[in-house]
Image: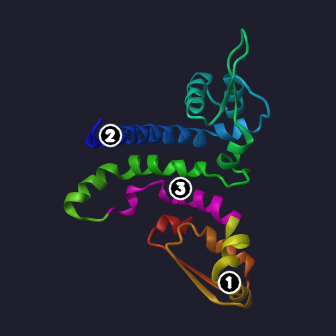
Amino acid sequence: MNQDDSRREAFGRKMTDILNYGALNLAMAIGYRTGLFEAMARYATPQPPAVIAKDAGLHPRYVREWLGIMFTAGIVELTRFAGQENAYRLPPEHADFLTTEGKAGNLAVYTQEIPLLTTCSMEKLIGTFASGEGIPYDCYPRFQAFMAELAENKHRQVLLDTFLPSVDGGRLLERLQQGIRVCDFGCGEGVALVLMARAFPDSRFTAIDIDENALAS
C-alpha cells in the first residue's frame, strides 16, 4: 500500500468515526431529554427495558432500541439471562458524567448543542454563508434554555468553590467579598450573576444581554 492509499484509508476511518459519533451524540441527547440516564442511575443491578421504561415514563419499544444503541457504543452494560429478556445497567463511573447527581458534572447536557443548532439554524446559517448576514436570536428558540441548563450544571458546581478562588491567585474572590461592581455582558438568564450576588452581598452586579426573552426570565 502506497502513502496515498494509506492516507485515504486513514481518512475513511476518521470519517466513519465522525458519522458514528455524530449519530451517538443524537442518541445520547434523547437519553438526556427523556430522563433515561437518570432512571438507569437509580438501579445498582441490570434491569430489563420494560422496567427502565416504566421508571422513565416511556414506551418500552423505543427504550429497547435506545438501549441497544447505548450498549453498542459502550455507554451501558448488557447482561443476558437464559430464557429472559436482556437486562441493562448504567455503570456508576459512567453515571458520574451523565446525571445531575454525578460526581464529575453532567456532561450529557452538552449533547443538546448539535441537535439544537441543527433544528434551529442550519438552513439559515447556510444562507448566511452567501449573504454574510448575522443570525438573529429568534432563530434559536431554545438557545437560552440550553445555556441555562449548561450554567446550572457548570456554575452551581464550580463557580463559587473552584473557579473564582482560582482567578488571580484568589484576589478576585477577596475583592468580591469586600465589595466591587461586576458587569456580565451576554449574561443569558443570569445564573452566574445570581449565584455571585447571593454569595457576595457587598458587591453590585449588573446583567446585560441583547436577548429580551433571556432577561425577562
**138 left or right of 155 in image:** left
List the residue tagged with mark 2: 6
Is residue 204 positioned above or below 191 on the image?
below
Position in image of residue 103 (x %, y %): 73, 53
Q: Choose mark 2 or mark 1, whichever is in front.
A: 2
Position in image of residue 13 (x %, y %): 39, 38
The quarter of the displayed image where residue 138 is located: bottom left
Query: Which SS class for mark 3?
Result: helix
Residue visible at 68% across and 84% down in the picture: 169
Of residues 206 and 199, the one drawn nearer to the viewer in this rendering: 199
**Which amino acid type corresponds to the residue marked 3 in the rendered image?**
Phe
Q: Residues within 10 Å of mark 3 (few under 14, many from 20)?
A: some
Of residues 99 and 199, the one drawn nearer to the viewer in this rendering: 99
Measure how far apart labels 2 and 1 are at the Cα level: 49 Å
Of residues 87 and 72, the one drawn nearer to the viewer in this rendering: 72
**Is residue 173 rendered magenta in the image?**
no
On residue 169, the disc is 1
Position in image of residue 182 (x %, y %): 60, 84
Whichever of callouts 2 and 1 sits on the residue coming sooner in the sequence is: 2
Q: What is the count of numbered marks?
A: 3
Measure how far apart labels 3 and 1 are at the Cα level: 31 Å
Position in image of residue 122 (x %, y %): 34, 50
> Which residue range is magenta in the image?
135-157
Q: Main secondary structure of the magenta part?
A: helix
List the residue tagged with mark 3: 146
